[in-house]
Amino acid sequence: MKAVWIVGTPVVLLLTWWVVGEPRSAMPSLLGHAVVTLLFAWTWSRRGPNSAAWLMGVAVALRCVVWWAPAMPQLSEDWVRYAWDGWVLVQGHWPTGVVPSQWQASLPVPWSPLAESMLDGMNSPDHPGVYPPLAQLVFALPWWFGVQSLSAWWSVYQGLVLLADAAVVAGLVRLLQRWGRSPREAAAYAFHPVVLLEGGANGHLEWAVVAVGVAAALSWPRNRAVTALGAAAAIGLKWLPVLGLPAWAWVRWSERRREGWVWAVLALGAAGFAALAWVSMRLFVDRFEFHAGPYYLVRNGVMAFTGYNPIRWLGPVMTAAGGLGVLWAATRTRWTLPQRWVVGWGLWLALSTTVHPWYLMYLVPLGAFTPWRWPFWVAGAGVLSYAHYARLPVDAGALGAFWGVVGLAVAWDIWQAKSRKPHRIPVTM
């Protein structure tokens, strides 16, 4: 078995280095990488070396390979918007109040070739920024470090991403050991393709949310103030981590007199951040459609009878249904906290109008602390969504294949549920 890791590790390293430079239209390459790395990650997590040192060595090597790959992000243009938002903040303006295309016309700051290159490279230049305050500070860091070009900004930003992600792997090893589990199970995250490509290679902000989430989990229960700060930081990076609050409040309800004010502050903060960027955020509720599931079925049924797209009212209805799914999962008393979180997040995404593959990244670290396999495989199947770009608005085959993976993985877990021992929470919640 040792020979498998000796041969398999260089293959995964080389394949990852190569696929980082592949565009989203190169579906055979993306799918091939996903299959190989998923099998590698899953096999290591089950039968690999039971050594944290070996795991960390390969995890760090993979992240170095991603950083050294001579390619800018290829799977989305979000990184350009990140750089723009950070640059706007350095200019003394707040990004959620700035429409990039209008800045070019009104020239509130000296226009430069750098600004022009960012405007040309970003998507949605006619909409203001959408990210919460802490995210904007993260985006500004490379500019504060003194970089002078977009490529230099990316190099520094990606370095921060990969350093934080290596720390996440180490943190997951420690958390798994607390749960009485083998450190090798962290391989499910360390080598997962959605982590390597959407986080490391393309810099989507989920890397930061996962990093502060793991730090918060490590601090519990010895330093509860740090845990609360970690939760606040997660919401300050992206609004959606607030979906974890209902399950936490339900589990901790007996402590509501002591902790309830913290829950209220977190909820109000999330609402405030959403209001601050609502002009752009609402697009994901009643305008954008991408790689959806049940939403498409309802929409197509309505369109068959009416002839018009009902997203303006159906989007909010599906969003509300997703919120109810989060609340339902939060109240499942037979589940552990990670199980409630992962099901709540899964239901939210299942009912959304827009599901980009990086949204699935949260399923991977949460799923590692459940007895279920579907979070790992569903997150990996997210790569199929890139097929839609060649056949917008949707590639029916890719969508069917994705939901086929979802159905099979969930069915397998249901079938196996009675024969598995549930994972227990090692500390008093």
Image: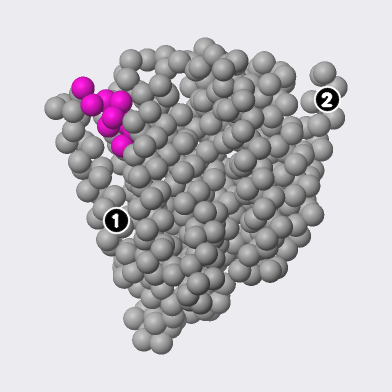
Report the residue marked by disc 2: 4
Q: Amino acid at mark 2?
A: Val
Q: Residue at x 51, y 25 (%)?
A: 369
Label 2 crowd bin: few (<14), some (14–19), many (20+), radius 10 Å? few
Q: Which residue is most to the bottom?
A: 105
Q: Residue 51's image quarter?
A: top right
Is residue 250 inside the magenta stretch?
Answer: yes
Report the span colored magenta: 246-254
Tell me, for residue 213, which label it has, or none: none
Residue 26 in percent (x, y) is at: 76, 60
Report the residue marked by disc 1: 273
Q: Which residue is most to the front?
A: 305
Circle 1: element type: helix
Circle 2: element type: helix
Is residue 390 inside the magenta stretch?
Answer: no
Residue 64 is at least partly visible in this image: no
Q: Is residue 290 left or right of residue 326?
A: right
Of the 4 image quadrants, the one containing the N terminus is: top right
- Up-down: is 265 above or below 95? above
Q: Is residue 195 left or right of residue 220?
A: right
Q: Residue at x 34, y 39 (%)?
A: 327
